[in-house]
Amino acid sequence: MTEQGATMDAPARTETAKPHLPDAQTVTQVTHWTDRLFSFRVTRPQSLRFRSGEFVMIGLLGDNGKPLLRAYSIASPAWDEELEFYSIKVPDGPLTSKLQHIQPGDEIILRPKPVGTLVHDALLPGKRLWFLATGTGLAPFASLMREPETYEKYDQVIMMHTCREVAELEYGRQLVESLKDDPLIGELVGDKLRYYPTTTRETFHQMGRVTDNLTSGKVFADLGLPKMNPAEDRAMVCGSLAFNVDVKKILEDFGLTEGANSDPQQFVVEKAFVGDGI
């Protein structure tokens, strides 16, 4: 995904670099999408097994020499040989003020203990699966949209993603557009995936917050779909704390019940998503 982003790839190496950080993994690629958003790929520990949609703790050494870690959803699917992450840049953020400057060949700390609620096991069987995200909350859905199980379990998958400006949608747009031609899952995706990107500040052909487009019914009208109902619809939510609270209320008003790994129901919310303060 390099059409709009400035991408750096790891140079060829004649020998394997020795880790200098605890739980170190090597950065293989960095793409800067905007002055606020970037994605990066790192090597994957051989022992790491995860379910698409889960997150891990990653970070760097802080100024005090101790690990500075934050929860990051893995944006790559469980079958990928590398790990991908999608991050905001915060100029004075304790972690991202440093993390945004990583380059191929650098190391990050990655604790190989994945957890999270945005997994298929936490939902009951259904007909349609809704991914509801703002900003970098897209990350776990970047993983799930590339997961074969997503299309094996559902007849339709709807990716609703809202950002302030059009450029902030680019990572998701390129990912979605690449899926139908993907040699591994292209046939599974087919016409099942519906993409519904919107902006809130810059003029775009689709505008409005996820919450407003759900409550007004606009998204259902635009996509030719029935209003959400507990018999057919399942949903996953990832965004800021305020967004999560608002969407949870809307889904409950539609009759859906929140679930968890230990109690599969009709929607789940990722409570560990880290927002603008990272």
Image: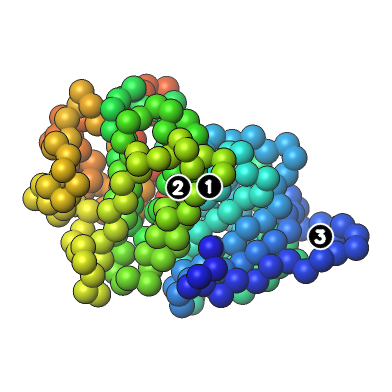
Q: Is residue 257 left or right of residue 254?
A: right
Tell whether label 2 touches label 1 (CB within 8 Å): yes
* Sequence order check, earlier mark of 1 and 3: 3
The image quarter in which residue 13 lies: bottom right
- The label nearer to you, 3 versus 2, is 2
Mark 3 → mark 2, Cα distance in angstroms: 40 Å
* Sequence order check, earlier mark of 3 and 2: 3
Above-or-below relation of 51 to 221: above
Picture disc at residue 20: 3
The local secondary structure at tag 1 comes to loop
* Residue at numbered disc 2: 180
Residue 38 placement (x, y as % from top left): 51, 67
Tell whether label 3 touches label 1 (CB within 8 Å): no
Q: Residue furthest right?
A: 15
* Residue at the spot 68% in from the left edge and 45% down from the top edge: 81
The image quarter in which residue 154 lies: top left
**What crowding class fits label 3: few (fewer than 14 Cα within 10 Å), some (14-19), or many (20 or more)?**
few
* Residue at numbered disc 1: 182
Q: Disc 1 residue type?
A: Asp
Residue 94 placement (x, y as % from top left): 54, 68
Mark 1 → mark 3, Cα distance in angstroms: 36 Å
Q: Looking at the picture, tell me which residue is in the foreground, 86 or 125.
A: 125
Q: Is residue 63 visible?
A: no
Residue 266 placement (x, y as % from top left): 28, 28
Q: Disc 3 residue type?
A: His
